[in-house]
Amino acid sequence: MSEPVLRISAVRKHFGQVAALDGVSLDVHEGESVVVIGPSGSGKSTLIRCAHQLETIDGGALYLDGELLGYRRTPRGLRPLSERRIAEQRRRMSMVFQQFNLFPQFTVLRNVTDAAVRVHGRDRSEVDREARELLARIGLAGREDHYPWQLSGGQQQRVAIARAVLVRPRIMLFDEPTSALDPELVDEVLAVLRDLAAAGTTMVVVTHEMAFAREAADRCVFMEAGRIVEEGKPADLFSRPRTERLRAFLSRHLSEREAAS
């Protein structure tokens, strides 16, 4: 198999005495959609925050296209990279957060295009054209001159996703992108994620949306207590869980969904 786009190798991360990540290893390959599930506090969000270098790791290593992230090797061992070099590495990934993080003073079009032009140095006219086409594909045609406060939460999150796509990252990371939305707005964001997965976008999605994980993932990862407990094809994990911990998690989720309905 080819070199993974993202390699997470025996990564450890502590917050005080708590092991948020306890030797986690995960490879994500070109065109693969990996969905990470698990209970709150299992380390899911910490995992992708470390991958995006928003959190420093305490052990192990991270690689993007075979390049070590965050450090350089010297005769005296590993040395941290400069903030400028880390920022350069980070620009090759995109991350979509729970909150939309849009600039309130910018229009939708400016929010989507600003990073591609200002940070990545792409041509303004080309980016504007591509952004308009992308906004149309995700159901936001005619909203280019609106401001974030004029949009619903689901529309704002779709703008944030469009902004992340437009910089042409090697991999996209999603940290529970629907958790801040009202229930009736969740499906419109998940539809965009399904389209990205179907188009072969390399991505890691942390989510509590089990139906999405089952339908859209090429591979599903179940985490608990800072470790990967099971991983594999969604059909296998959801239909034939091997561990009692995953069986209990899925049973609990099903019970909560039935109670909500």
Image: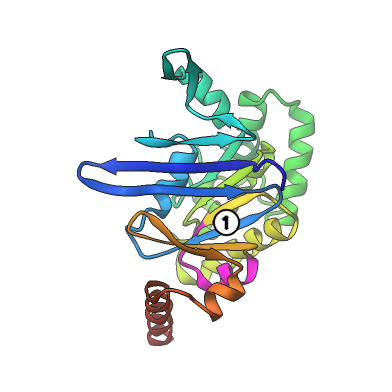
Colouring scheme applied when the structure was drawn: rainbow
Between residue 253 and residue 73, name the one nearer to us.
73
Residue 4 picture quarter: top right
Magenta residues (range): 206-216
Question: Which residue is located at x 53 percent, y 66 percent?
Answer: 186
Q: Amino acid at mark 1?
A: Gln
Secondary structure mostly seen in magenta is helix
Name the image quarter holding residue 219. bottom right
Extreme residue toward the front, this view: 75
Tag 1 secondary structure:
helix
Q: Is residue 187 above or below residue 175?
A: below
Is residue 119 positioned above or below 49 on the image? above
Residue 160 visible at all: no
Task: Inspect the magenta stretch and tell me whether residue 39 lies in it.
Answer: no
Q: Nearer the viewer, residue 59 or 47?
A: 59
Residue 245, position in %: x, y? 37, 72
Q: Which residue is mark 1?
A: 155
Rendered location of residue 91, percent (x, y): 59, 30
Give me the residue at 37% from left, 53% from top. Answer: 43
Question: Would residue 145 appear left or right of 61 to someone viewing this image?
Answer: right
* Nearer to us in this view, 220 or 93: 220
How many marks the image carries: the answer is 1
On screen, residue 115 versus residue 78, left or right, reads right
Pointer 1 local density, CA inside 10 Å: few below 14, some 14–19, many at least 20? many
Residue 224, visible in the rendered structure: yes
Q: Position of residue 234 (x, y in %)?
A: 59, 70
Q: Residue at x 65, y 38 (%)?
A: 169
Image quarter in which the C terminus is found: bottom left
Instruction: From the top left corner, tell me how far across and down residue 230 is, in percent.
Output: 48, 65
